[in-house]
């Protein structure tokens, strides 16, 4: 009797453990059923987001003009900045998108946007705002995409970057985020490379991302425990906690 | 009525997270709060309540996390805690608030431990505590708002 109970508990623990292990595979592509269900659910989510934010014709609304608040001004500024971005990175086409939801799980920082594979968006494409790179596309469905932000704590999430010093580029890897100080972590840099405060960190151009997108400036550095390489702490101008509009850089189809 | 509440809370979770900064003290777990407050209605219908937990967990993952079945399992485990709390404590506004705090803390701790166990993310304890504290205010407020609605319909 006691053995039966123990066997039951062990079996349940193994099943739960296996299911958790399978479900926490972040790199897993979406199944067809998931894509279909997401396409049904996300438009409803979009309606809720629309009614809670200000995505309407401002000039038509007397009430909004009268009560124009700070968040709306910020959104308008963000949209204007995005239009400015149309003039840069000419080798890539730009697609503007609105954020419709955000992953509430603090550690897997991602957002869902209202553009998908039907708009030519592919995984690994760079996602930017006027302040520089914010993340890359991790999953797509026909009309929606998930953007994994640079602040995600996912251990497999890495972006190839360069640190520009006197017109010379040094390659490194951006992976990790220091939540306490709001700084991005850049690793794998030779400790002998003379990196100074305020040196710029840009995308390297490796992967499905254009070269030279601004990420941030070096604030400080720390040599690792083995005295071999440095970790840099990078300050970005982007407020990752309130992103309403983004631009996706997609490869031009010739 | 409870189904409508669940659906509204599910979508409100996403809508609120886009308008409120993640650094604020207003991190929503409105669906979890709803699942907590509706339990007395399903006290004698355990299977139905468990089905609600599984289905809402799957929908939550589809909408916000892309982690297939993860929230279905987490909600089921949290459901056991909810049942235990309702069984052992008298229902009043104060005990409900304290029970909700316990439920939110266990929910966040469960997610953090799972992610840490399977090496999905690097998590430190201060982050977990910080996240729990920042999740309390808006959800307690939502509980107080839902309390009379759910009770009136009982």
Image (tube, rainbow, N blue to C red):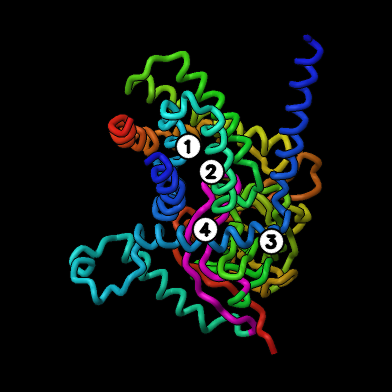
Q: Residues within 10 Å of mark 3 (few under 14, many from 20)?
A: few
Which of these two is toward me, B92 or B112?
A: B92
Residue that mark 3 sits on: A32
Q: Which region of the structure is painted magenta?
A: A91-117
Label 4, label 2: how many angstroms apart (C-alpha)? 12 Å
* Residue A78 visible in the current orientation: yes
Image-quadrant location for residue A34: bottom right
The circle on residue A41 is 4
Which of these two is toward me, B60 or B113?
A: B60
Subunit ID for the residue under disc 4? A
The circle on residue B32 is 1
Residue that mark 2 sits on: B56
Q: How far across and how far down the image is residue B116, in percent? A: 69, 36
| Horizontal side, residue A242 vs residue A12: left or right | left
Mark 3 element type: helix
Subunit ID for the residue under disc 3? A
């Amino acid at each position: 009797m006691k053995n039966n109970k123990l066997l039951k508990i062990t079996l349940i623990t193994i099943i739960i453990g296996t299911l958790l292990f399978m479900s926490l595979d972040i790199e897993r592509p979406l199944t067809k059923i998931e894509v279909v269900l997401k396409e049904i659910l996300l438009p409803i989510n979009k309606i809720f987001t629309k009614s809670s934010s200000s995505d309407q014709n401002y000039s038509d609304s007397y009430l909004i003009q009268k009560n124009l608040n700070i968040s709306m001004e910020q959104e308008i500024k963000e949209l204007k900045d995005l239009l400015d971005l149309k003039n840069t990175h000419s080798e890539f086409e730009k697609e503007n998108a609105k954020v419709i939801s955000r992953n509430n799980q603090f550690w897997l920082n991602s957002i869902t946007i209202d553009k998908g594979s039907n708009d030519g968006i592919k995984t690994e494409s760079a996602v930017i705002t006027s302040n520089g790179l914010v993340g890359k596309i991790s999953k797509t469905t026909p009309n929606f995409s998930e953007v994994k932000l640079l602040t995600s704590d996912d251990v497999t999430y890495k972006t190839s970057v360069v640190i520009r010093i006197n017109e010379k580029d040094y390659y490194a890897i951006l992976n990790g985020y220091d939540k306490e100080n709001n700084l991005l972590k850049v690793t794998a840099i030779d400790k002998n490379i003379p990196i100074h405060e305020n040196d710029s960190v840009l995308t390297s151009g490796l992967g499905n991302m254009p070269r030279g997108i601004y990420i941030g400036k070096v604030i400080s550095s720390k040599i690792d425990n083995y005295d071999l390489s440095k970790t840099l702490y990078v300050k970005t101008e982007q407020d990752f906690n309130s992103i309403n509009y983004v631009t996706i850089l997609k490869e031009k189809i010739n | 009525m409870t189904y409508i509440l669940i659906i509204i809370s599910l979508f409100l979770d996403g809508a609120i997270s886009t308008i409120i900064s993640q650094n604020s003290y207003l991190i929503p777990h409105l669906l979890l709060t709803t699942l907590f407050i509706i339990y007395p209605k399903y006290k004698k219908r355990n299977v139905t309540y468990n089905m609600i937990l599984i289905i809402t967990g799957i929908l939550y993952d589809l909408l916000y996390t892309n982690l297939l079945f993860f929230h279905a399992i987490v909600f089921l485990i949290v459901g056991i805690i909810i049942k235990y709390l309702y069984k052992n404590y008298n229902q009043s506004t104060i005990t409900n608030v304290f029970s909700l705090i316990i439920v939110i803390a266990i929910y966040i701790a469960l997610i953090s431990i799972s992610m840490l166990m399977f090496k999905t993310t690097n998590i430190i304890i201060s982050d977990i505590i910080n996240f729990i504290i920042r999740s309390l205010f808006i959800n307690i407020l939502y509980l107080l708002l839902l309390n009379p609605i759910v009770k009136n319909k009982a």
